[in-house]
Image: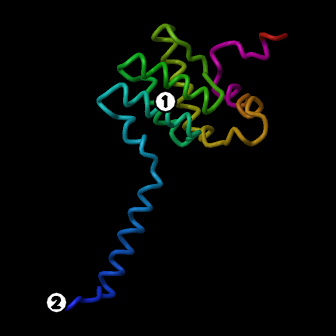
Amino acid sequence: MTVQRRPSRRSLSHGWAMLCLALVGCNIPPYRANFNSDDPTERIMAVQAAAKAGDRSAVPLIVDRLEDEDNGVQFFAMLALERLTGERFGLESGQSSAERLAAIQRWRAYIDQGAHKVSMNQGNPRQETTPAVERFGSGSVAPEEVRD
């Protein structure tokens, strides 16, 4: 006959602590790890997942992908940033290296100011982003200027 032992209080509290730690770790979106993957397809999927999730805290990671070695990753990063922030800062497909570098520098200034942390859900996104364009420059004609 075997005697079953009840778990000690220590092992129960240890189990609860491990469960809590596991749940805290779940707050980090799974796509974050793929931003630096060796596979360009995984980097593209990470960029797209962040944009789809509306994860504005991923904007600095996506800006880093603007200088990715893969042109496809760069392109999807540009689209994701526009989706998340409503901005391009003059970044366009097929532009010269100098123009691209200047646009990326405007993105980095935008991040340094913490402007990417402002929610687009607060009021009109175009109104929120206009001051950013004024501070960091757009490098292109704003849609409002084209309509007039």
Q: Is residue 41 depicted above or below 128 in this figure?
A: above
36 vs 132, left or right, is: left
How busy is the neighbourhood of tag 2: few (under 14 within 10 Å), some, or many (20 plus)? few
108 vs 70, left or right, is: right
Q: Indicate the position of residue 14 as horizontal and vertical percent values.
A: 33, 77
* SS assignment at label 2: loop
Q: Indicate the position of residue 131 as horizontal and vertical percent values.
A: 72, 31
Q: Which of marks 1 and 2 precedes in the sequence?
A: 2
Indicate yes or no whether the magenta region holds residue 133: yes
Inspect the image, locate mark 1, and give the three-letter code of the amino acid beneath it.
Val
Q: Indicate the position of residue 25 as horizontal and vertical percent values.
A: 41, 57
* SS assignment at label 1: helix
142 vs 40, left or right, is: right
Which callout, 2 or 1, points to the residue nearer the camera? 2
The residue positioned 39% from the left and 30% from the top of the image is 43
The residue positioned 50% from the left and 15% from the top of the image is 100
Q: In which quarter of the image is the N terminus?
A: bottom left
Q: Which mark is residue 63?
A: 1
The residue that label 2 is drawn on is 2
Inspect the image, locate mark 2, and give the three-letter code of the amino acid beneath it.
Thr
The residue positioned 51% from the left and 8% from the top of the image is 95
* Magenta residues, start to end: 132-145
Q: Which residue of the protein is positioned furthest toward the left in this rendering?
A: 1
- Viewer-nearest residue: 147 or 51: 51
